Image (tube, rainbow, N blue to C red):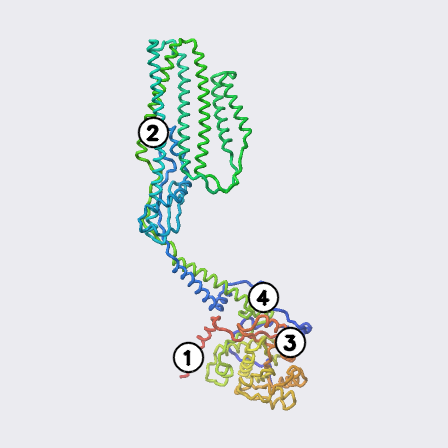
């Protein structure tokens, strides 16, 4: 009979996960405990964080699920890309001049605004380019074979701060996309030419009418001068009247200029109204606060009257009729402006077309300007009348002659100017200038959808993301033991004494089989793991004897019986006398592992039908004996907690160095708790990826409440695919065995 004071053979072993130290307390150091019905539930460590190793382990565990999700999503993206109709895009670039070129008009500033109303913004041109009339015109320019193709998309945008407009069209037909893009550019250019031609035509017609009217007035002035000369016989003015006449001529010229400006403003107003009439009146617009058009006109008129008042005060006194007339108009305008509301609220969702509204606002400004010019004409007429009264001292005939000559010269100059502009307008009307031309035509169409490469990349990314997310979610919902952290958290940091690899066939791969066949490989991973467990047990309890060890688990089928048998075998192989007791009185299995009889055993000894020595059976392993269960009793807890059962264990301690007890699962019945009070230590067997975290935590709590010493955890059915050093063991020892065999030969 021996104990752990015996020397330990010198052999190379590895101690894993702190197996050389113990976190358990001696029996005398443990606080008193009481039994309760419920055990503490399992809680994960709140400080536990994801690491690369944990993530890799999770991916290995859930590789099947992740691979399935990844392949499904990738296939879905690829299938969608393959069945999606192909869309082609073609692009062109237009150079748009938002200001109408007026170079052909010469210096005709008075009529320039009629042709463009100060130009349109590029944003307006882009909207016109994308409008339905331009699209319809572009369809009309296409060959009949392409008119049935579908236009998927049309986009026009201004390139930065330049006057370049990029046009892109998309279609399922590449030829249609390329042809329609060029047709759209051509339709827009033609529309701009037509618009320019119509504007020149309207302006030419108006100038021709004014030229005819001016010719009539010029002929009338010439006839009046001729008749006056015939009646009076005066051919020229006297020298003494030149000074006074010069001032009068200046006023007359100013009056004629104001009248010409008034005529030009009226012409410009007609041009703007003509351009606005060509645009739709109403478009959708949000409700806004706007200043009333009447208020704007009155404010502009007030500004014009103030300017005229300043000019009049420089020529006349403050009490002159001219100054008083202008001041009266200013007071009248102010009173009218005070009566008008400043702003109005547009509540309707429909609003004027932005371009047309701009033209109408410009027309309102021109109306106000024309009213100012009319007021200026009236003021100049009053000034001319005053000059006439001041010239009363001149001979009536000389004054009349000067007046007739001045009228004739004024009409002649106006007629000459209008005739020159009419010639320029006819030239421009014959060759209208477009406000845009094609900078880069569309020469090809390229496929934009579907992009198989991008679809595959997106499928790979989304597949990996979805697979990882689903794996994490499933792993979080999985209550099984998957890592050492799970075991430590469930057992309150109990040491892990050994990792037992998964064995497919106990009869061929167990320690018992190796012990009965000495010619087999003595360095298998399974044997090394049990040697590690044996060494860990030696270092776990140093100062107190460890003779009787119980093995239990949380649930059935975790392999505690095979672990107990292999542990007993490896202890016997170390020269110890070992007695393996099968205390699972409900489902005995130890005698079957060794191929022995189960008719006589533990229950026979407790019942007093035979002695312990008579019930013990020998095994093929030297030093290892087995005590089977025997007949199944009707009351296992009462039998295990009896005085005879305790005496049996005491006797077993006397006849063997080690007593290994295979106990039932602790979570399902009270048998294991009863046995735990009679042993020196308890080993908790946890099945890798089969044991439940809550069950392990509850089992640990139940055993701990009995006051038994928890030696540690033995991880059974460990999947060595997740540990690289297992492969190292196999390669290393295979090579070692090969060298040994060669040396023997």
- Of badges 1 and 4, nearer the viewer stands 4
User: Is residue 5 among what the camera can see?
Assistant: no
* Marks 1,3: beta carbons within 8 A: no
Mark 3–mark 2 distance (CA, rounded to whole Å): 114 Å
Mark 4 = which residue? 44
Q: How many C-alpha atoms fall within 10 Å of the one at disc 1: few (<14), some, or many (≥20)?
A: few
Mark 3 = which residue? 708
- Side of 205 relative to 606 (left or right): left
Q: Secondary structure at mark 4?
A: loop
Q: What residue is shown at x 45% (from left), y 24% (from top)? A: 374
Mark 1–mark 4 distance (CA, rounded to whole Å): 46 Å
Q: Is tag 1's residue or tag 3's residue first in the polypeptide sequence?
A: 3
- Of badges 1 and 3, nearer the viewer stands 3
- Of badges 3 and 2, nearer the viewer stands 2
Q: What residue is shown at x 49% (from left), y 30% (from top)? A: 297
Mark 2 = which residue? 106
Mark 2–mark 1 distance (CA, rounded to whole Å): 107 Å
Whole-percent x and y of residue 270?
40, 31
Q: Is tag 2's residue or tag 4's residue first in the polypeptide sequence?
A: 4
* Marks 2,1: beta carbons within 8 A: no
Mark number for residue 738?
1
Relative height, residue 465 to residue 427 (above, below): below
- Side of 344 relative to 356 (left or right): right
Mark 2–mark 4 distance (CA, rounded to whole Å): 89 Å
Q: Secondary structure at mark 1?
A: helix
Whole-percent x and y of residue 120?
41, 37
Whole-percent x and y of residue 401?
36, 12
């Amino acid at each position: 009979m021996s104990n752990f004071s015996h020397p330990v053979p010198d052999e190379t072993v590895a101690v894993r996960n702190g197996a050389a130290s113990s976190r358990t307390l001696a029996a005398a150091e443990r606080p008193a405990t009481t039994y309760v019905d419920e055990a503490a539930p399992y809680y994960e460590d709140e400080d536990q964080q994801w690491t690369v190793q944990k993530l890799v382990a999770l991916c290995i565990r859930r590789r099947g699920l992740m691979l399935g999700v990844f392949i499904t999503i990738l296939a879905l993206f690829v299938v969608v890309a393959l069945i999606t109709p192909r869309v082609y895009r073609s692009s062109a670039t237009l150079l748009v001049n938002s200001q109408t070129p007026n170079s052909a008009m010469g210096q005709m500033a008075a009529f320039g605004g009629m042709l463009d109303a100060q130009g349109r913004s590029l944003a307006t041109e882009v909207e016109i380019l994308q409008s339905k009339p331009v699209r319809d015109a572009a369809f009309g320019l296409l060959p009949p074979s392409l008119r049935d193709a579908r236009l998927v998309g049309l986009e026009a945008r201004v390139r930065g701060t330049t006057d370049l407009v990029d046009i892109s069209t998309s279609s399922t037909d590449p030829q249609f996309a390329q042809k329609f893009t060029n047709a759209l550019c051509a339709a827009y250019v033609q529309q701009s030419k037509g618009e320019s031609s119509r504007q020149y035509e309207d302006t030419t017609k108006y100038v021709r009418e004014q030229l005819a009217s001016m010719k009539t007035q010029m002929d009338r002035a010439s006839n009046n001068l001729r008749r006056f000369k015939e009646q009076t016989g005066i051919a020229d003015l006297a020298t003494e009247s030149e000074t006074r006449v010069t001032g009068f001529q200046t006023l007359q010229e100013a009056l004629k200029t104001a009248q010409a400006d008034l005529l030009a403003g009226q012409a410009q107003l007609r041009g703007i109204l003509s351009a606005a009439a060509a645009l739709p009146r109403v478009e959708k617009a949000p409700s806004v606060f706007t200043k009333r058009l009447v208020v704007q006109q009155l404010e502009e008129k007030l500004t014009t009257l103030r300017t005229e008042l300043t000019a009049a005060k420089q020529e006349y006194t403050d009490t002159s009729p001219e100054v008083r007339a202008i001041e009266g108009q200013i007071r009248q305008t102010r009173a009218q402006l005070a009566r008008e509301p400043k702003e109005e609220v547009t509540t309707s969702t429909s609003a004027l077309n932005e371009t047309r509204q701009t033209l109408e606002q410009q027309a309102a400004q021109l109306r106000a300007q024309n009213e100012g010019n009319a007021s200026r004409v009236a003021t100049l007429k009053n000034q001319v009348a005053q000059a006439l009264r001041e010239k009363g001292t001149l001979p009536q005939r000389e004054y009349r002659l000067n007046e007739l000559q001045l009228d004739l010269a004024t009409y002649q100059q106006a007629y000459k100017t209008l005739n020159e502009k009419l010639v320029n307008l006819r030239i421009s009307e014959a060759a209208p200038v477009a406000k845009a031309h094609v900078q880069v035509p569309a020469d090809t169409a390229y496929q934009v959808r579907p992009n198989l490469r991008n679809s595959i990349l997106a499928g790979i990314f989304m597949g990996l993301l979805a697979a990882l997310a689903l794996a994490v979610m499933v792993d979080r919902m999985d209550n099984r033991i998957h890592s050492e952290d799970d075991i430590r958290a469930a057992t309150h940091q109990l040491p892990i004494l050994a990792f037992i690899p998964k064995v497919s066939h106990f009869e061929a791969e167990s320690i018992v089989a190796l012990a009965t066949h000495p010619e087999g490989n003595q360095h298998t991973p399974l044997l090394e793991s049990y040697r590690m467990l044996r060494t860990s047990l030696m270092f776990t309890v140093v100062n107190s004897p460890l003779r009787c060890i119980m093995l239990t688990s949380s649930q059935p089928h975790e392999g505690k019986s095979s672990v107990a048998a292999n542990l007993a075998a490896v202890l016997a192989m170390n020269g110890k006398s070992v007695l393996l007791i099968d205390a699972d009185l409900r489902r005995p299995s130890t005698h079957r592992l060794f191929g022995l009889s189960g008719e006589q055993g533990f229950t026979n000894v407790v019942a007093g039908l035979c002695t312990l020595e008579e019930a013990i059976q020998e095994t093929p392993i030297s030093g290892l004996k087995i005590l089977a269960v025997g007949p199944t009793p009707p009351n296992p807890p009462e039998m295990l907690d009896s005085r005879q059962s305790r005496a049996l264990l005491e006797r077993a301690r006397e006849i063997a160095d080690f007593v290994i007890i295979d106990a039932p699962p602790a979570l399902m019945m009270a048998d294991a708790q009863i046995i735990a009070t009679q042993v020196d230590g308890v080993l908790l067997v946890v099945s890798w990826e089969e044991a439940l975290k809550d069950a392990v935590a509850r089992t640990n709590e139940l055993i701990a409440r009995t006051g038994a010493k928890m030696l540690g955890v033995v991880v059974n059915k460990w999947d060595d695919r997740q540990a690289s050093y297992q492969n190292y063991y196999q390669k290393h020892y295979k090579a070692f065995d090969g060298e040994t065999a060669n040396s023997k030969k």
